[in-house]
Image (tube, rainbow, N blue to C red):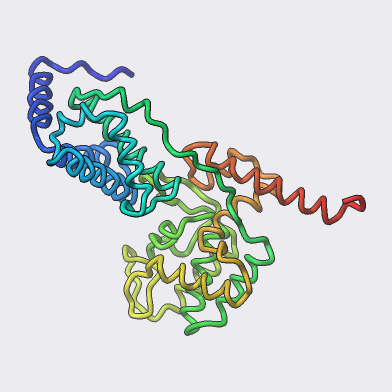
Amino acid sequence: MAPPELSEAERSEAGRKAAGLNRAPAAAALEAFIAYMANERRSSPRTLESYRHGCQTYLQFLAAHRGGPPTAEALGSVTPAELRAFLAHRRGDDGGGLQPRSLSQNLSAVRAFHRWLDRRCDLPNPALALVRGPKVRPTAPRPVNVDQARGLLLETAEQGEPWEQARDAAVLSLLYGCGLRISEALSLTAADVPLGETLRVTGKGGKTRIVPVLPQVADAVAAYKLQAPFSLPPAQPLFRARRGGALGPRHVQATMALLRGRLGLPDSATPHALRHSFATHLLGAGADLRVIQELLGHASLSTTQKYTAVDAAGLLAIYQNAHPRA
């Protein structure tokens, strides 16, 4: 459906706002851009933080390069050479020594800012499209195998109080059994328990999806809630730290570091690796790629397709180990 036409008064008001923003400092335009990303695009807090930081470093570089803070209007005259100099600055030690992937993300934030300036403030800068980002070599996920995943879940029984053991087992079960992100698992409230056959999850960008729940996962979460020594009001976080506050992702990461040390697993065995394992093991068992995309909450199928490389590598390893001519 085509957007409704603006009235003459609305066009005049939009023009006045754009004109006022053009004359304002670029930092004010950046805040308006971040507000747009938050309110209209519904971007996640982490995305907003990344875009804000990337664009702020860009404006700081321009201020140093041009001898003063630029206005929004001045951003329309940024040259490709200046943008390349900014990227070189960010790549160097004085700019934090960003790796190609982080540098590419910084460039994406700057380009999104300029696209917004073009659409909302009539400040196009097509020359910046000439700047190419760094080459980023795609990396395949590094999941744990089935036995390692089982060992991680069993090893939680070796640390902390019984209720803490049950809590850690429940969180890791959600990551591996349902393919949740850490933030998604820790966002569950007491009202979500007992878990049914499915669970509604709110992921990145506020998008919701339905994931199936294995009986073993539901039992692990129920066992934790039964043993938790704290009052768990329905609207409050389900998983609690030792002093009763909401459990944070750092604890889950530290727990995985301890467990992988005990089991002799590589550093790649992180909490997120359990989510990778969920997808890889489903794919290896014959699950459809589109189904895995829905279960993981990926916006693009290309994001999910990286698991096919992992599965192909596993098949090749089995072939080489089993074939008499290998």
Residue 101 falls left or right of residue 111: right
* Residue found at the far right of this picture: 324
Q: Quadrant of residue 229?
A: bottom left
Against 308, is 156 above or below?
below
Tell me: 23 left or right of 218.
Answer: left
Residue 75 percent location from the top left of the image: 20, 31
Image location (x, y in percent) of residue 121: 18, 26
> Residue 312 location in percent, x, y?
71, 45
Instruction: State which quadrant residue 1 falls in.
Output: top left
* In-front residue for pair 282/63: 63
Q: Is residue 70 left or right of residue 314?
A: left
Which residue is painted at 15% across and 29% down in the image? 73
Residue at figure coordinates x 34%, y 47% from the top left = 90
Count every numbered label the image shows and give the total. 0
Q: Is residue 178 left or right of residue 117?
A: right
Name above or below for residue 128 compared with residue 27: above
